[in-house]
Structure formats: structure tokens, C-alpha cells
Image: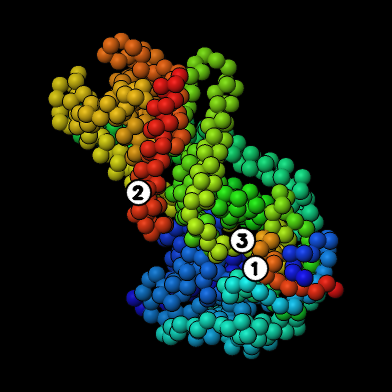
Amino acid sequence: MNKKIFTLVGSPNSGKTTLYNWLTGSHSKAVNYPGSTVEVQIGDLKDHWSKEAVHVQDTPGTYSLFPKSADEEVALKALYKPAVESAERVVVVVVDSTQLERHLLLAMQVKAAAFPLVVALTMHDLLEKNKVRLNLRELEQFLGCAVVPIDGRFGKGIPELVQSALKAASKKSGVPLKHWTPEQFTENQKLTARLAGQTVDANVEKVFLNTERLDAILLHPIFGIFLFVAVMSTLFISIFTWSGPLMDLIDSGFSQLAEIAESLGPGTLWANFLSQGVVASLGAVLIFVPQIFILFLGLGFLEATGYLARAATLIDRPFSKLGMSGRSFVPVLSGFACAVPAMMATRNLSSARDRWITNFILPLMQCSARLPVFALLLGFLFKGEPGWKPGLAMAAIYFGGLLIGAIAAAVVHRIIPDDKKSFFMMELPIYRLPRPTVLLRQCIRRTLAYVRRAGPIIFVFAVLLWLGVTFPQTNPETQLENSYMGQAGQVLEPIFKPMGVDWRVGVGLISAFAAREVFVSNLAVMFKVTGDEDSLQEGLLETMKSATFPDGSPIFTVGSVIALIVFFMIALQCMSTVAIAVKESGSWKFAMSQLVIFNLVAYVLAVVIFQLI
Amino acid sequence: MTLNKLSAKNAKAIVTSFQGSTEMVERLTEMGLHLNQSIEFLGQAPLGGPKLFKLSTIVLALRANEAECVQVELV
């Protein structure tokens, strides 16, 4: 390839991601999850900035070229070896102009490592608003490169930045930078302090007054906690209420599509594959998109305003008692939607031990895939009773998951040896109002990234499941019993029996490894519930009521249903989570122990509960 | 005294030296703390959480053990 590549590097909160969005628009290839840019992103420079085709690479935020956490290591690697081949390179160091003294250190390191560079000065509008002038000429002389102020809200300065970067690009790559000694740090800091002191007026402090005032309320010992609970509750309530109509729409849309597919060739294998194998599986993947989207939107908003850093600060003390860190907060929060992006977000933790514990307990956060399962089971327990009862039970399940997670973390915290490397050290950015379009674009990209990552796995397993229940082909009446899945279920029945369920529910439990929500649709298949999709839940509840073991005793009792709920709360029935756990921990041992421990504990607890009730 | 001992709201101090692991001190430096830096105590996060400090134009939240790595003198 003979394209040029711009690599963006900058400290967290430097405005790097906003610049990336301006440069590339909404077209971007790699993944980006809330909390931080945890993977390198590659996009193409929008052609209205330059006729020349250019790659743009965004890296996770880093304070220096001497990495202290996994995401900073990713940034360093991408700097020296960009994710795509290129002919000429240039590093764009993103520097917050209100933080010159610190952020210039990173620019100096990039320069010391002999990379061709340009500096993008962000937040310049804030300085201008407060009539603070920077001496750009002096900065350029000091760094020996172009320094271009940009406005992250309106895109001012970006054409100039692109031109300077194109001019600076060269075939040269950086050389490894020797670790600065403490003396060198002090020496260089004096230099940047002198520069910042000369260039930044003391007026800059004005900008921070509002932030200080807000912090006095948002981090107040009493109001702070109250507001934290209020903000998080609002986020959760919106995830579940706003997504409802959209999820219903997707659900009914896909069931209509499935019917259409079925009607193309009634009774034929290919039509059945199309409707039950392909369309229904796609539906299973997409049904959670509204929830994920709203979660990402909420997180993105909190992140962009600056509140997320405060929330992490607030939660640091209780979390550190459990062997985690305030930085575990975003992963834990994301875990309520899906453990996959949540595990990726732990890269921001400096201590391997904190990260290990956080990753370990993440599957205990009740992810949205469990929601339809709980809805069905609670619907059974509270049939015909007022709506607040199942609502309360659902809340109890969520808090229960959090509590079990806390207990698990506390246990592991005691068992594994201490690690002195746990840092919190959080920079609290100034409060700003995010731009809706930037927020929305970023949120759409994150949601698509999630679908691309989790979708194929769920889809493949759902198709495998279809094959399992469809073959070998026998008499339609006894198809299920004789299918591979049915046979396997019957062989394994002695395992499910102590939980109080039969082989058909067992097959549902196994199939839930593709995606937990598959349990519901699979139960419908196993118990031969027919009827149109709108009344699927009703029909299923009726069937569950009358389902019996061969000896005539009911399968679904209060005891067995509660046992199932507890099983779903704890069991790690998710192949995507296992896959991401292997990748993020870099250890099969970790992922396998997690898989075995969670499922074993879930099983034992379910058996004990069923036997007791 | 160490930075962790600052307790009066808006108490101001000057950084005189660092102690602790190289990595910790390096990260503190990278976050903007350096010798002769003036620093102001803003308060503590709820639940006995990290302490908040203002240095020039940055607000930093530091845990007690992190603040203990910084020696300061009151001004």
C-alpha cells in the first residue's frame, strides 16, 4: 500500500476521539467501546478534507510512551506498528490546550522517539472564550513541528491540521524510546512548565470555576451518593423502558419474516431452515440491539459530560474493598447489558490483579440476554398477580446478581496474592455539554461494533442448534425425541433431574450456551407450543403449567422454577463470553476455571434450592 | 508532611519530594505532579473515597496510598 497514515495519540480526555470522528466521519472499521477507546481503530480520511487517500488510526488514551496498563500498551504498539501497511506516516499528538504543561510531555516523548509529528491543540475554544492567547509560534519552535488549534465542536482548524500532517508525513518510523529517568522527567517538566507558563494566562483558571462548583455538589458526601444512585437508576430504567417498544417491533418483525420464509415452501426442509435456522437466529441477535444502544448512549453521554470519571471516583472505595478499583465501574455497568464489551473495557485497569477480579465477576452482572428468561419464569411464578410483584422480583434478581458478584470478588480478593501495582489516580475532566451528533454517531458505531463481534457467534450456535433438532429426520410426531439434541438431552437427563426438570428443559439449558435468550424459544420448540408469535409467551405459560414427567407429576413447580432462576443468575452459559475471556485474560486456564466454577456453583445451588423447597 | 495529611478544604501546599515505587512516582509525574508544584486540597469523595486535589488546571483524584507518595509543605 502506498497510502499515508495518520496515527492519533493523546492523553485520556484530550479530545482525541472527537478529532478522529471529525477526520473519518462515521466510517470506521475496528471496535470502540464505552469508557475508553480500548482497541485501535482504523478509518479513512474523509475526502472533503483532502483528495489524497489517507488512513487514520485512533489509539487508546495514554499519558506517556511508558505504558502502565493494557490499553496504553495497545497504544504504544499501534504507534510503532500501525494496524495497516502504509508508505508514509505521521503522528498527530492531541494536546488539550488547557493542559499544556502535562500533555506537551507526551509530544516531547513522541519527538524524542524520532517520529514525524504534528500537534493538534484541542479545547482551544475554551481558551478563546476566556480571552486566553497561546503563543503558537513559540510552541512550534520548541517542538520543531506544526501546532494547529482545532475546535472539536465545529471542526474549525481541521483543514489546516490535515495539510500540516500531509506535509510532515515521511517514510521514517520512530525508534524505541529509553525510559526517562526521574531527573529527565523533572528536567523536561520544567521545560513544558516554562512554556505553558508563558503561553497560558492565569485566566485559564476561570474555566475551572464551574467545574469546581459542580464537583462540590456531585461529589458531596451526602448529595453525591444520592445523585449517583439517581443517575444510575435513571440509566437503568431508560434501558428497560425505552427499549421495550423497539424490541417488540424487532420481535414481531422477525416472526413475520419467519412466517413468510416458512410459507415459501411449507413443509420443506429449506424453508424451515430459512425461517427457523436463519431468520429466527438473526432475530435472536438483533433483539438486544435497542438495549445495548441505549446503554451505550447513556454511557457515552456520562463519559462526554465528565460525570463518568466522578462516578468511578465515588465507587473506588467500596470497590477496592472487593479487590477492584473505581476504574472497574464502567466494565461492571456495561456488564448489565453484555459481558462482551464489559470485559473489553477492563483494559483501562492498571493492575493485572484488579483486572483479573473484575473480569472474573463480570458474568454475574445480569446481562440483558437473561431478561427474557426471567420474564418467562417470573411470569409463571406470578401468573395473574399484580404487576408490581414480578417487577420487585426482577429488581431482587438484579441486586442479587450484584451481591453474588460482590461476594465472589471478596472471596477471590482474599485468595489471590496482593499486587502493589493497583493505581486509581483519576483525572477529573472539566464538565462539558456533549454535542448530540458526535454522541449519536459514536453510539451507532459502538453498537454496530457489538453486533459484528457478538452476532456471528450467536448466529452460528443458533444454526447448529437448528441442525441438532432437525436431524436425523424421522416421523414429525417424534422428531424432537429422536433428534440429536433430543437424544443428548435424554442421555443427560440424570444430571438435570436433581434440579427438578426433565430432559426437554435440559436441552433448553444446553442450547442457552449459544445465547441465554435462546432458552425461551427453545422451550417453545421442545414443548411443541404452537400459535402465533404474539401469544407465544401465553401459550408457553399454559403448556408449562400442564407439562408433566412420565409419572404425571408436574415439571414446573415453584421449587423448580426458582431453581432455574438461580441457575440462570449464576451459570456462565455464553460462548461469546468464554471466547472474549480467553482473549482478554490471555489465559485458557482463567476462562475455563471461570466456566467450570460458575456452572458448578449454579448447578449445586439450583439442586439444593429445589430439594429444599 | 505527606499530601495525604492535607485536610482543611482549600489548604494549599508545595510539592517537595516523592517517595514510593518508581512506577507510582512516574505516573504521578505524568499526571502533572512535580517538584515545587503548588497543590490545593478540594475535598474527599464520599464513602471515604479518593481525595481530590487541584494542581494548576487539573483536578486529580488520588487514593490515600497514592497521596502518601508525595511530600508537601504547607504555604
Q: Is residue A282 above or below residue A129?
A: above
Q: What element carries label 3?
A: loop
Mark 1 belongs to chain: A
Amino acid type, label 3: Phe
- The residue that appears at 56% across and 30% down in the rendered structure is A396
- The residue that appears at 77% across and 70% down in the rendered structure is B1
Residue linked to disc 3: A424
Quarter of the image where one finds residue A101: bottom right
Q: Is residue A468 above or below residue B17?
A: above
The answer for how far apart the CA atoms under marks 3 and 1 are is 30 Å
Amino acid type, label 1: Asp
Residue linked to disc 1: A151
Residue linked to disc 2: A592
- The image shows residue A158 at horizontal and vertical percentages of 58, 72
- The image shows residue A252 at horizontal and vertical percentages of 42, 30
Q: Is residue A517 visible?
A: no
Q: Nearer the viewer, residue B52 or A590?
A: A590
Quarter of the image where one finds residue A479: top left
Mark 2 belongs to chain: A
- The image shows residue A482 at horizontal and vertical percentages of 18, 25
